[in-house]
Image (cartoon, grey):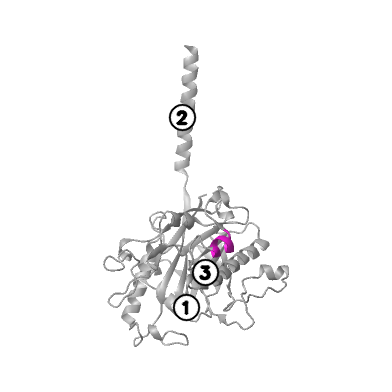
Amino acid sequence: MRIKNVFAFIVMFFIVGIATSQEKKADKKFIVNTVAFYNFENLFDTINQANNDEEWLPRGAQNWTSKKYHQKLENLARVLSEIGTNDTNHNAPVLIGGCEIENRGVLEDLIKQPKLAVNDYGIVHYESPDKRGIDVALLYQKKHFKPMSSVNVPLLIYRNESKEKDKETEEDKLDKDKIEAKTGERVYTRDILLVTGFLDGEEVNVMVNHWPSRSGGEKKSSPFREAAGRLARKIMDSIYKVNPNAKIIAMGDLNDGTYNKSVKEGIGAKRKKEEVKEFGVYNPFEQMAKDGHCTLFYRDAGDIFDQIMVSETLIKTDYSSFRYWKSGIYNKPYMITTVGQYKGYPLRHGANEVGFSDHFPVYIYLIKEAK
């Protein structure tokens, strides 16, 4: 009888202990910040400037009027203001990477939209040498993020990659982001934007990418994106040399899937957290792609070109500082084409409708325990 009583007491002790532990875990409060990326798809104003914007003028092929431009801004602002609000007490993303941006002016117009103005966004933007005149940029909520430095890192790539194998130094082997032929022509594309700052007091490095397109075919253009992947990796390694514990977020429209060589070998991204070694990179969107999710349709096949990757330092289990929590693709019904040949595709600009983009935006959550 005594043995039964002792056993009952032990069982009760463990039940109470487990319940108390779960209650404490449930009681923990976390700070949740959303980081997003969105391809704005041809965010051009209606002013003729010294770039290839003729198509996006009132008399251009798109008949791009002031009314359409402002509708586009309103549409983008609606999406950006909603991303992540289900899990962050209605707070829009603290960091937003964007691409296909004509100039700083269109960003200034965008953040003045009522749905975004309440968050007081700042802008980090540089003009890039892209032949279409489009750039990448970072928007940030001033009350949460304080940029300390920024740089536009050029991607130097050339057509007709040389087949000659000259002797290479160790430095040359590391500097393969420069694909060059003796008679080659430079491919002018977007630079990689690197911004270092403090997110609610913690240093974070953010890279915004828009890698070379698949113009001319995926196979023919792949070396350009592979070069972009190596350049992105080189930037990360440079950051780690200064600070081995650096937190890095790499985001962008890569024009490649999570499985392509540019991502898997160039950056060295891993699908599973347990595969990520020191100084490594975790890509949560690889599993999402494997599960059949997509951010765009390319030649009638869905894929995830828009990705956000994080450094090994952001996937540790100590939540006393910011860590990666989870990721998602923002694709609400109003952003999706409902009829016709492109039913199910992202709702983009057309002859009779100003849409959103041909891409869905992506996002991740960073969390830490509140003090």
Q: Is residue 243 magenta?
A: no
**Residue 15 vertical placement versus 71 (above, below):** above
Which residue is pictured at 35% across the width and 78% down the height?
Answer: 69
Position of 304 with respect to 241 (left or right) is left
Q: Which amino acid type is shown beneath numbered disc 2?
A: Val
Position of 130 with respect to 350 (left or right) is right
Mark 1 or 2: in front is: 1
Q: Tag 2 or tag 3, which sits nearer the N-term?
A: 2
Could you tell me how far apart the alpha carbons at marks 1 and 2 are, in whole angstroms? 60 Å
Q: Is residue 96 visible?
A: yes
Could you tell me how far apart the alpha carbons at marks 3 and 2 are, in whole angstroms? 51 Å
Tag on residue 134?
1
**Residue 192 vertical placement versus 35 (above, below):** below
Residue 239 % position (x, y): 63, 64
For the residue pair 55 and 239, the one nearer the viewer reads as 55
Q: Tag 2 or tag 1, which sits nearer the N-term?
A: 2
Confirm or deny contact between disc 3 and disc 2 (CB under 8 A).
Answer: no
**What is the magenta range?**
261-268
Name the residue carrying label 2.
16
Magenta stretch, overall SS: helix
